[in-house]
Amino acid sequence: MAKNKSVKRHSHPGRGGRGATHPKGRQLDPKAHDQILDLLGDNLRSRDLLIEFLHLIQDKYGCLSTKHLVALAEEMKIALTEVYEVATFYAHFDVVNDQTKKPPPITIRVCDSVTCEMFGAEELISALSKKVPTEIRILRAPCMGACDKAPAVAVGHTQVAPATASVVLEAAGEKKLSRDLPDYIKFNEYRKEGGYELFRECINGIHTPENLIEVLNESGLRGLGGAGFPAGRKWEFVRAEDGPRLMAVNADEGEPGTFKDRWFLERDPHRFLEGMLIGAWAIEAQEIYIYLRDEYPEIRKILLREISKLESSDLLEPGCIHLRRGAGAYICGEESAMLESIEGKRGLPRHKPPFPAQVGLFGRPTLIHNVETLYWIRDLVQKGSSWFTQKGRNGSKGQRTFSVSGRVKNPGVKIADAGITVRDLIDEFCGGMQDGHNFKGYLPGGASGGILPASMDREPLDFGTLEQYGCLIGSAAVIILSEEDDTGDVALNLLKFFEDESCGQCTPCRNGCEKAVQLLENKTWDKPLLKELSTVMQDASICGLGQAATNGLNSVFKYFPEDIK
């Protein structure tokens, strides 16, 4: 049968070949490409800098447009899908497609985590929603590290705490979206107090790595980010691996109730930096990566300024320390997820083994510590292990930094003996309970540490003392509850946090948190189903987020039956 040549076959734009009207996929916009070139400047187009480059775009244009993402992918020679999946993983990036409006110029983030909810976060959100103009948007946000000043709000990058609707709106109206730097011990001041002398002794051969490891082992210093692994043994494990080796510092404290690392860095950053350099020297690390949470922009400025001074001295070769910004993902506080994020990827926890000490950052053996652990290194070595071990109560040795918030008169960071009880912590360091509030219970270790009743106020707060009760001290984020607080509501708040912060990699955590929230929002709880769900999450989740997400709920079942719905 003869074909009618006047009627042509439809040519689909993605068909390819001679019949294609234009190439497949999104095309590079020359103007957007020029803008990306200006932003990136002379920086290496290294794959691990992807998140840093996304921050540059977000900071400059207030969002991540499709055109800019295409241009970034082209410039870095990586697939657009990789750029997109990383950009959409982190809460602080606003990805805008062709059909989506650019976000307003000012964003107000209201923390709705446990302590802030106790002090009126919901009422604050309601009040702001009625008063803000259209050029301002309001978002819920997880813990901002200001639990001692709850409720906390971020106006742009300016933190307002304690916040009221009028104060927040005034800050937004003034459009002052960054805060002045706090008063801290600067490089020259630190040197005058003997700072970096220990590090100089190390590089001059006065000390050996073995000597330092022995001091750490004798002191019993453990990882104070929450895991509690002995610091000296960690150094030994990394040193036993063939080089080249790296070091990564976890400064991404995001556990609701935790703000101790912020306290150290805002006051005495060089004591931390010296401890970090000593640790890197001991394991012969070629480079150091500091992963800092994005909610601490002032600390970022401090560290950039003070690291530059270090590099200008005779103590440090320039380019050895890399400061990387988080982008609003609690999961990146998990050590392997942090490594993935430093590499410019989504913060998905890795399966273990191998452990980071064996195969860590960029596949190299990596020493990982948090800020507080490194902060104590100088004092431990100079004063001796006995200085540390002679402290402690109730059979514990050493001291801990407690982030205390909730219904106490004087919340804040408290450096106290390891093994102190919550009763003594409240009475000796916090001025007692707030007027009109009776002690009901406490979270000994933040969102994942469970909840204990006031009747158990004499239990020592330390590693290994609370596990028998289904609780953990973790990062020592202690949240005090009164009789005005419903532990059932607290458990729901915690699970909403974990639901939002789950990386989504494994089904037990991803679906389990979502299902648990749905069940807890019912008027009557299905207790057997919730317990079964909790068991599955604890047994089958890949990392500690899913494994510990229901600790608070299980505590309600065990210790607060009166609050069960």
Image (spheres, rainbow, N blue to C red):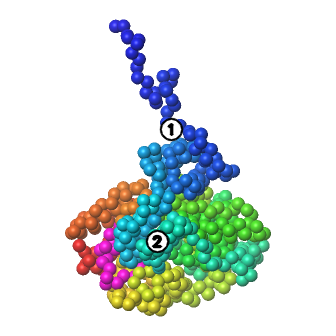
In the image, is 25 to the left or to the right of 298? left
In front: 333, or 388? 333
The residue at the far left in this view is 524
Which residue matches tag 1?
26
Task: State whether residue 557 appears in this view.
Answer: yes
Q: Is 455 inside the magenta-drawn segment?
A: no
Q: Secondary structure at mark 1?
A: loop
Q: x, y percentage for residue 223? A: 54, 73
**Whole-Å distance between the Cαs marked 2 and 1?**
41 Å
Above or below, 188 against 40 in this view is below
Q: Residue at x 47, y 52 (%)?
A: 102
In the image, is 488 to the left or to the right of 418? left
Please report whichever mark, 2 or 1, sits nearer to the chain's N-terminal start: 1
Q: Is 482 inside the magenta-drawn segment?
A: yes
- Judged by depth in the image, the label closer to the viewer, 2 or 1, is 2
Q: x, y percentage for residue 135? A: 45, 59
Question: Where is the N terminus found, in terms of image quarters?
Answer: top left
Q: Residue at x 57, y 86 (%)?
A: 389
Q: x, y percentage for residue 443? A: 39, 78
Question: Where is the C terminus found, in terms of image quarters?
Answer: bottom left
The residue at the far top in this view is 2
Q: Residues within 10 Å of mark 2 (few under 14, many from 20)?
A: many
Which residue matches tag 2?
168
- Image quarter of residue 58: bottom right
Q: x, y percentage for residue 444? A: 42, 79
Q: Amino acid at mark 1?
A: Arg
Q: Secondary structure at mark 2?
A: helix
In front: 449, or 66? 66
In front: 101, or 335? 101
Q: Which residues are magenta?
A: 478-495
